[in-house]
Image: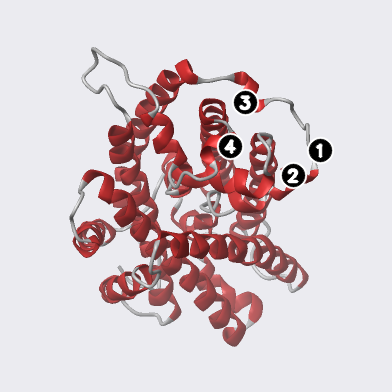
Amino acid sequence: MSGTSNSQKDQITTSQTAVMVINYMLGAGILTLPRTMVEAAKTPDVWISILISGTIILASGWIIVKLCSRFQGQTLFQFLPEITGRAIAMLISILVISYFLAISAFEIRIMAETGFYLLEGTPSWAIVMTFMWIGLYLILGGVSCLSRLYEIILPITLVFFLIAILLSSRIFDIDHLRPVLGSGITPVLKGIKPSLLSFTGYEIMLVALAYMKNQGKANKAMIAGVTVPVVIYLITVIMVIGGLSINGLEKRTWPTLDLMRSFEVQGLIFERFESLLLVIWIMQIFSTFTVTHYAASLGWSQMFNRNFRPFVFAMLPVIYLIAMVPKDINQVFNLGDMFGNVSVYLFGGVPLILLFVSILRKKGAKPE
């Protein structure tokens, strides 16, 4: 695949684009989101924070679609020089690529940490490198191969997730969510920030829109891609708080897994569901890792107008080294918080500025 043009054969449908966004967003965040939000807000009303965050993400995604629709058939890395000039475009591109690399490394490290539940005693490097090489094979197939795999992974994830959540309803206590807004609106606003990393994913439209067969439906793909994860995160937070209470989950590293551990169903093939859910969710983490690895490699190839494949290989050791920088799980979570803060400005503010500049300078075509 060349970095100069987007192959006509390597295209994706509207539904595949939505699925790609969904799989990107449904990464490691669901395993920790209830704890991080409750730690920040100290209230069971964090489900309201998720609704507010989802609305903000939809607005940010709409801005990205409007921007990319002015340069149909081009990714962010291709049309940036036309808006800002080459020097500024290179700076922004490097920031975006660095972000994708960091998210890719973060997800692969989380995969190693959660992998200890299933592969106790296995060295983290063995877990990480196995998934990285499998991901490499997939990425070399291009965006269409990625999207086809995601179409297989997503239904499996949703089915097992819904089964696990429904079974956990036996320990659900609605009183753990009361009173609504008992501490006012301020704690709810504090709960918005921790959810930002979990909602990252809409920014992949900066790349994916260029490969859509019907780019006029990009907004529909983005809305569907954001809405499904918002609903899933909302259900997860409500069920975890209802099952464990806010006092019971603040000190839990993986509260969603602990919820699955809190009950068992006798007579079924799987009497305990946390291992099954973790296996399924590792596929989602793998999805986030591959799509961000792909986006970072594509960014380098299009920046330097070079072939795509060498950059895919070159990014492997970089991602591995970044993933191994945090010394413990607390540093990993701190790194995640930092990425969430960066994403607010990088994908919330910068695309809006670029959209205004492109309109003022009359760059790109007006979307139909």
**Which residue occupies the foreground of this view, 187 or 151?**
187
Which of the numbered marks, if any, corresponds to residue 343? none
The residue that disc 1 covers is 184
Identify the element where label 2 is drawn.
helix
**Which residue occupies the foreground of this view, 195 or 273?**
273
3D distance between C-alphas at marks 1 and 2: 7 Å
- Give the amino acid at mark 1: Gly
The residue that disc 3 covers is 176
Identify the element where label 1 is drawn.
loop
At x 64%, y 35%, the residue is 47
- Give the amino acid at mark 2: Pro
Badge 1 vs badge 2, beta-carbon distance below 8 Å = yes
At x 32%, y 39%, the residue is 278
- Observer able to see residue 329: yes
3D distance between C-alphas at marks 4 and 3: 10 Å
Which of the numbered marks, if any, corresponds to residue 187? 2
| In front: label 2 or label 4 | 4
3D distance between C-alphas at marks 1 and 4: 19 Å
